[in-house]
Image (cartoon, helix red, strand yellow):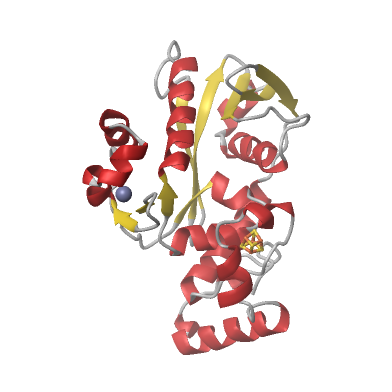
Amino acid sequence: MKIRCATGELHEVEKARECQSCLASVPKPILHSLLLGKDRVRTPKEKPAFGVGTLVVDCLRQSYYKLTEEEILDLEKLWIFSRGHAIHEFITKTLEDKKEKEIFIKSEFPQFDVIGFIDAMHLDTIYEFKTTGTIPETPQTHHVLQVQGYYSMLPEDKKKLISKIKIIYLSLQKIKSFDVPKRDILPFLESRAAQLTLALRHKVPPEREVGWQCKYCEFYDMCFKRDAALSGPALAEALAKAKEANNTGAHMSVSEAKPGQATLQ
Ligand code: SF4
Ligand SMILES: [Zn+2]
């Protein structure tokens, strides 16, 4: 992870802690809290594990870039994340750790795992909390899919106990709760994860999923300039070439492993 300084320079986290312009924009104790634990290095694993959130976003190419490109954050974004995290902590304070909040779930597949943390589960209800500047009229699609994904991944005995799924939006002014229908979307998660696994394995991004999110996408230039040619038939060709070069003949490809599930070959 790199931090974008007010001067435009990109810092290593260590450097940002002592940078005079970073300290001028955020006072030292806050800056150090914001940067706490941010210099952890991610170690690549043999078998990828994808968070549910990574799979349900509107564009899988965006997730691919997030996994393969260095993350660059400015202090303002770090503040928004940390503030959201602090609100999360506060509202789940009275719940029992690992049993009623931050419940780890995992679905294993031959070539990848899908993992997630359920914000809270109390009696017969799954809760997903979202902090936001403005509370939306209806819940966002990827938020709905995320929480339905968690439901789908629960072990059968726990699933039976659930009768409600709720997304709670929290702004600094208001709290608003939305009911989400129960739905098993495991095949969808599997298919998305298979596409991402294939893309990562061959280092070829998945197809663009163009939509409203492109306007806010931090990888816009990369997607439409650097990788401009990687779309449609040209993308399929690049993938075929990468497969050949990697000579994966000995391995089962993701699509062969699960016919009819993965949509990208
Ligand atoms: S610019 Fe749009 S299509 Fe490209 S990665 Fe971002 S969200 Fe996906
Ligand atoms: Zn700086």
Of residues 182 and 65, the one drawn nearer to the viewer in this rendering = 65
At 48% across and 24% down in the image, what residue appears?
A: 88
Q: In this view, does 241 lie to the left or right of 262?
A: left
Place residue 52 in its image quadrant.
top right
Place residue 191 in its image quadrant.
bottom right
Q: Where is residue 72 in the image (x, y as percent from the top left)?
A: 42, 55
Q: Is residue 14 left or right of residue 179?
A: left
At 70% across and 62% down in the image, what residue appears?
A: 209
Q: Position of residue 99 (x, y in %)?
A: 44, 21
Residue that extends furthest to the top in the rendered view of this protein? 94
The C terminus sits in image quarter: bottom right
* Residue 38 visible here: no
The N terminus sits in image quarter: bottom left
At 64% across and 81% down in the image, what residue appears?
A: 229
Q: Position of residue 54 (x, y in %)?
A: 55, 50
Place residue 134 in its image quadrant.
top right
